[in-house]
Amino acid sequence: MTASTAATSKSSGAASSSPASNGAPLLELRDVEASYGPFRSLFGVSFTVREGSVMALLGSNGSGKTTVVRVCCGLLKPTTGQLLYQGDDITGKRPFRLARIGIVHAPEGRSVFSTLTVEENLQLTFRQVFGRRGAKAALQKAFDQFPRLGERRHQIAGTLSGGEQRMLSLARVLVHEPKLLITDELSLGLAPVIIDEVYRTLATIREHGTSLLIVEQHVHQALTLADDVVVMSKGKVALAGPVGELGDVTESILPAVHGELPSNGGR
């Protein structure tokens, strides 16, 4: 993604950003702690996602990023703390209930049926949500949003490029028209040129009014799109704030990603 494209995407998102009627952020984590059995993974994690914005959640392997995602999607219940959505407490709610109110997760990996065509993959999902009659309109909407998929509608999904398979998995989850899309390592295993294509797709999704929580290891790529950033290290928030206020990437964000905590603890 070029700098001009990123700037356009950020400015359009900022213009469309509006808080919930009660003034609350779209999503908020308050002092969240989480464990896998006896092993504690998160320690007092707090941050907010503003409506209409893109939040980049960064960190090295084992930093706690995936655990945060699991909490936000309802896959893991916090041991303490709260998860709030537009000011309402949704702590511990199951994933299907969160999807109904607008929180949708695009998991790591390609998540497609490799032996079916692009159209068949989408039809399976759309018929479950809209029924046979509504699936046709949903299919056309998906092809309008992802023209490349329309061009490949009769192609077997397993023969698509890595970036096209990511697009297909996104089209399947966007059927719910989420207010918040959480993406988990969408760039994993992709060539740089394909990563650029995936991020152009995310910019388009954001322009259609969906807020994004992007979980990434590719720092520079995530920052081309993000308005705000949270860096995780050893299960804690090491650094957080608007991208434009965090200073030079190499002096502030990259050291935090690699576990070098700022002297103020990121507060």
Image (cartoon, rainbow, N blue to C red):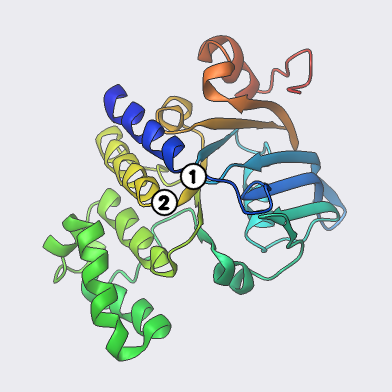
Residue 29 visible somewhere in the drawing: yes
SS for tag 2? Answer: loop
> Residue 113: image x %, image y %?
34, 71
Residue beneath disc 1: 52
Count of labels in the image = 2
**Residue occupying image coordinates x 72% and y 68%:** 93
SS for tag 1? Answer: loop
Direction bottom: furthest residue: 132
Residue beneath disc 2: 209
Q: Is residue 114 left or right of residue 68?
A: left
> Residue 222: image x %, image y %?
45, 32
Which amino acid, by three-letter code, is at mark 2? Gly
Q: Is 29 located above or below residue 192 in the figure?
A: below
Which amino acid, by three-letter code, is at mark 1? Gly
Instruction: Compare marks 2 and 1 and give the one earlier in the sequence.
Output: 1
Direction front: furthest residue: 21
Quarter of the figure with the C terminus:
top right
Q: Is 220 located above or below residue 196 in the figure?
A: above
Task: Characterize the local packing of mark 2: few (<14), some (14-19) or many (20 or more) Cα atoms within 10 angstroms.
Answer: some
> Residue 225: image x %, image y %?
41, 33
Which residue is at the front of the view, 120 or 16?
16
Mark 1 and mark 2 in contact (Cβ < 8 Å)?
A: yes
**Residue occupying image coordinates x 16% and y 64%:** 150
**Residue occupying image coordinates x 40% and y 32%:** 10
> Residue 196: image x %, image y %?
29, 36
Residue 117 visible somewhere in the drawing: no
| Mark 2 → mark 1, Cα distance in angstroms | 6 Å
